[in-house]
Structures are given as C-alpha cells and as structure tokens.
Image (tube, helix red, strand yellow):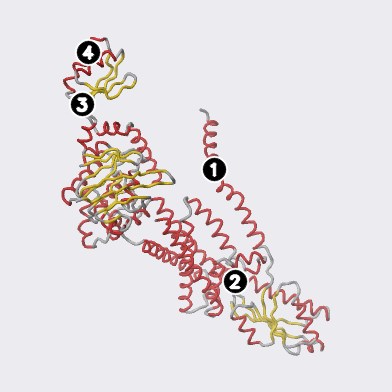
Amino acid sequence: MKIIEIHDLTKEFNGLTAVDKINFSVEKGEIFGFLGPNGSGKTTTINMLATLLLPTSGTATVNGFDIIKNPHEVRKSIGIVPQEVVLENDLTARENLEFHGALYGVAKKDMEDSIPDLLDLVELEDRADDRVITFSGGMKRRLEVVKAFLHTPTLIFMDEPTLGLDPQTRRVIWEQIQRLKKEENTTVFLTTHYMEEADYLCDRIGIIDYGKILDLDTPSNLKHKIGEGDIIDMRVSGDIDSILKKLEKEGCSLKKREDNFIRLMALRGEDVLPKIVRLAEREGITIESLSIHEPTLEDVFIHYTGREIREEKAESGIKAVLKKFKGVK
Amino acid sequence: MNIFQEIWIIWKKEMKVWWKNPAFAIVRSLMFPLMWMVIFGIAFSGTVDHIPVALVQGDFGEEANRYVGMLNTEGVLDITTTTNYANAVEMLKEREVYGIIFVPPGFSRGIEEGNTVEVQLSIDETSPQVSNTVISFISRISDAFSKQIAPSSNMVSVQKNTVFGQGIEYLDFLAPGVIMMTIVFSAMFSGGLGFVMDREFGTLKMLIAAPISKNSIIIGKTGAGVVQSLFSGTAALLIAMAMGVEVKTNILGFGLIIGLMFLTAFGFIGMSMAFATRITRIEHLQLMMMLVIMPMWFLSGGLYPLESMPEWMRVVAFINPMTYATDAMRAVMLRGIIWEAFALDVLVLTGFAISMLIAGSLSFKRTIE
C-alpha cells in the first residue's frame, strides 16, 4: 500500500521554482530518505505534504487523503519533527508532551502510560518535570523526536532529525526510528544531510537537487548505479597519462581527474591496488596518496549533483550553533 | 591591532547595522521627539477651557444679565442656558455638563438694593483640573462683578455644592486611566508580542500543523490574553484602592468595572494581533508601542482632562478608543452607576472590540494560510 503518492507537485516562490513537478510514492512501513543540499527543496516538499504550505500546482495524497482537499485528515495521520526545535521553553518536558498529545486528541489515560515510556526511550525520564529551557540542545532534540511518536501517527515526517547532534544522541534517535518501523509499522519520511544516516536507516532514498528528483532507489542500487566495484582515489606527481591506458586495460575506469588527483573504479580494487603501485614505480611516477573504499552515498551524491555535501554540512553546523545562541538570548 | 583599531571596528559595525534599518533610525530620531513635544507641549500645557456648564437663570433683570454676560467671556465656559433646574440636573448626571450655575430670582433686585446675593454652583469634581478651573473662574468673575458696583465689596457670594466626586484628588482622577493602560499593555504583550514570539520560535507552526481549526487557535490565544489582562487590570485596581482611591460603587459596579476591562482587553488584543501579523521583527512591535500605544494613552484624557487640549487634538481623542475606556472607567469608579453617563462609551468599546477581533483574526488567518 502506498502511503504517499505525489503527482507533479510544484512550488514556486516569487518565480523561483523550489520544487519542480516531482512524482514519486512512498510505501507504508518504509523508511524513506530525502537527500539533498540546502535549498534543494527538501523542506518545501515536506511542508507541502504536511499541509503547511499550499502547492503552486500538482498535488499529493497522504494516507489516502488529498493534501489540498482534505488537509485536516492528513494532519491527523501524520507526526512532524521539524528542523528547528519548537518546544515551549517554559513548560516541562512532560507538559510539552501533554500539550502535544492533547492537540492530537490523545486520551489523558493513554498519555499517563505512554509519556513515561517515551521519556524513558530517549533517556529523559529523570528530567520529566524540569523546564525545557534548562535542557541542552541534544535533550531538546530527543524530546522533539518522541513528541511526534506520542499520538502514534501512521506516518512521521522528520526534517533533519539528527542535525548537529553528538554520535550517541544520533544513535538513540536512529534506534527509535527503526523500532517504530519494526514494532508499529510506522512510515518515516526523513530528510538528511548525513550520508551514513541515509545509508544506515533508509529503505529507499530520493536524491533531490534544484527541486528535481535526480534518482530514487534503494541505497545499494544507488551505489551500484555509479559503477560496480571499488573506488580508488590517488594523488600523484609525474606523467600520469602513460599509465592510465595500462590501468584501463587492467579493468580500471577513470571516473574523475582534477590536476594531480585521479579517481578510478575497479571491480576488485584490492587486486588492482598492487598493480597500480608497481606500474607507477616502473614509469617513475610518485604516488603521494592512495586510498580505496566501497562506493558510499556520498559518491552517489557527488555523481548526481556534482557537488560534495560536506560543504553543506559545515554550513549547517554553523547555523545550528547560531541557532543555539539565538535560543540563549 | 591597537585598541583604537578595535574600537573603530566595533563602532563601524554598529553604525552599519543602524543604517541598515533607515526607517527605524528615522522614526526613532525624528518622530519620537516631535510626537512627544506635541503631546506634552501642547496637550498638557494648554489651559483648561470650553468647559460645558449649565446655567439656570431665575432672573432676567439687568444686573443678572450683566453677570451672565461676564461669565460668557474668555471662553472658559461653554454655557447652556435653561430655566428648568431639573433639566440641568439631568445634564449633570449624564455628564453633558460639569456644573450648574444657579442665578436665583431676585438677583438683580438684591444687587440694586446693595445686598449680597448668593449664586449656587453645583459641580462635578471627578475631574479636579476642570472643576478647579470652573470654581476659580466663577469666583474671579463674581469678584470683578462686585468691584464694578462697589469697590472693596462682596456683592456676589458663590455657594459651592459638590454633586459628584466629593473629596476627589488627582490620584482618583488618574487611577481609572492607569488601570486601563495596564489592561492595554497586558493585552499588547499577550496578543501581539506572543504572536511574534510564537512565530519567531516556530511554536506557531506546530499549532498550525496540528489537526485543530485555526479559529480554535485564535480564540484560545485571545481568551488566555483576556484573562491575563484582567489579572493585570484587577491588580492595578487593588493597588489603586490600597493607595486610597475610593471606588464609589457597589457590587454591580465592580462587575461593570470587570466588564469594561474585558471589552478593552478584547479590543486591544485584536488590534495587536492585526499589527503583529504585519510585522516581522520584535523591534517593530516596540516601535508601535512607542508611537501608537503611548500617544493613545496620553491623548485619552487619562492623565489630563481632554478640556486642556486644543480643538484639533480633541479630534484625535475623539477617535481614540482609549478615551472611551478611560472615560467609562472613571464614570463608574468615581460617580457610581449612572447608565446614561457611560452608555456611549460601552457602545464604542463594544464596536471597537468586535471590529478589532475580526481584523485581528482575519489577518492572523491570512498569515498562517
């Protein structure tokens, strides 16, 4: 069963197309990842699906309800973990959850049972009655995430759920996402900058840039699409052209070349590596660095967008820090 | 880098930021002094004049007419002449006039015979500056009148009789306006500021994303704002009472006071909501407070009677909802329940509350759609 079906969904802001006629669907119980740089249209898409933003054209159904004609029903079926933490700072963790639960019509009795459990899941049980303003960024984020679990929605949207978190906290949130899928068959639609997160969590990944879906597949299929085998990166000095031909004969294919940097792909990289070293020695070429790795989503991403997502990471890191300062003030 | 370079860097950056918001800088540096000088310089330093009073003339003899003619000079009083005393009392009750001057029958004859005659002044002292002006003006005119007949004599004695506001001081006059201002400030904070903060911190977005109607959000927030404003207003009332402001009313009157606070809070929450949806920065809300709310208060007659303002400024007071809020509050607190005295105020306040709530919720809805 398809829980999200998107048809030609488009959003323009003052003539700028943020989301450009996208079409795809998400299966029930699936963890779907939306991967793309800042400003690629991820959040705009989520906002439209969550009925926070009206599409310029096209539409989508969420849990069988049209997002334009039936936003109220859509809202009832979904949970949202927004990019920024939106808790009431002056209320306690428990009060924040109670307020949220009440908004979504969760019975008081049910909340009495589930709130302690949820707080326990994210290791906040002993801070339940402290005001959120006293929480660290990671604690707030954890609370924000379980807040969306409270009304047991069939579908949860998570916009950068682990942005700027330390590895332990990130691990806790990953576990919770996987538990939801396994125990409740909840569908999770998440956006992320983090390749390893998408790789680790997602059943399928959509790569989006400039408002267009560039590809959509399982992580392993996506990795295969950029070629079979291992990626070999090397930095050399000397006349590289002479050995490139010979290497291609050995089953290496040239993927990228930039000054003295070369990226090759080879089916059995570990076998090819010694050959490269020997060839280079014979031709009098100095290898300054040499590395081999299996293709990652990072490589897939670069393949599709021509950009590294790392730059974005750094930028968003600074943003996260600034946001924290704003919160303090 | 030496300390001067460091200072220069900081100075330059601050100036840059300042200049990036020219509207703000200009408004602050030009509008602010202009506005306040107008308010304080003109509204508060003007003399109190054109005070409406009723004149019950029981004698139309030569001397009486001359006396009345003198009362009509200088533009201090706006005199409505009547021969029916009951009429005049009705006008005083309904606050159409501040006082009744009674020139008794036999005034002219008494003067001609060289006797001292008595002029009665029944006065509403709920506005001390106004009543003081009336009293001193009438005494002065009576004196001058006497002296024209016989120097160093006292032919006309003025008998003062306070009808409303016995023993009222400036504090009593001031308190109703302060209570209303407290309500308005509280309403601005819980309505407008709350909205801007909610939007700034994203909590508004979460409410909008929830499966509840937008009307519920608006009504719920407004309702909370009203209760918070009533709390502040009641606190202000209690402080005033503790300071000796005598509330001349019964339980029903207190109910009315709460009702007036309620209407005012509603209206101003709506207004601040309508403003808040238009602005993007908290600073602009502060600016609005400075340029809209404060002048509204100063030109409401809350600090100083409207009679002290020049005509054109009274027009501003006339369209200012705070004028009606303060006026009604003062009427109930200092005079008790005389419906006719504040019916118009209640009507205007109700209209203001309803229209502002509609304006506020409409613009709120538009921003969250």
Q: Chain of mark 2?
A: B
Q: Residues within 10 Å of mark 4 (few under 14, many from 20)?
A: some
Q: Which residue is mark 3?
A: A230
Residue A124 versus residue B114 in the image, above or below: above
Q: CA distance from mark 2 to mark 1?
A: 46 Å
Residue of label 1: B18
Tell me the quarter of the picture where residue B208 sits. Answer: bottom left
Q: Is residue A202 visible?
A: no
Mark on residue B169? 2
Label 2 to label 3, Cα distance in Å? Answer: 92 Å
Q: Tell me whether marks 2 and 3 sit on the same chain.
A: no
Report the number of numbered marks.
4
Q: In the image, what residue type sits under mark 3? A: Asp
Judge left or right: residue A273 versus residue B228: left
- Relative to A294, does residue B151 appear above or below in the rendering? below
Kind of residue at badge 2: Glu
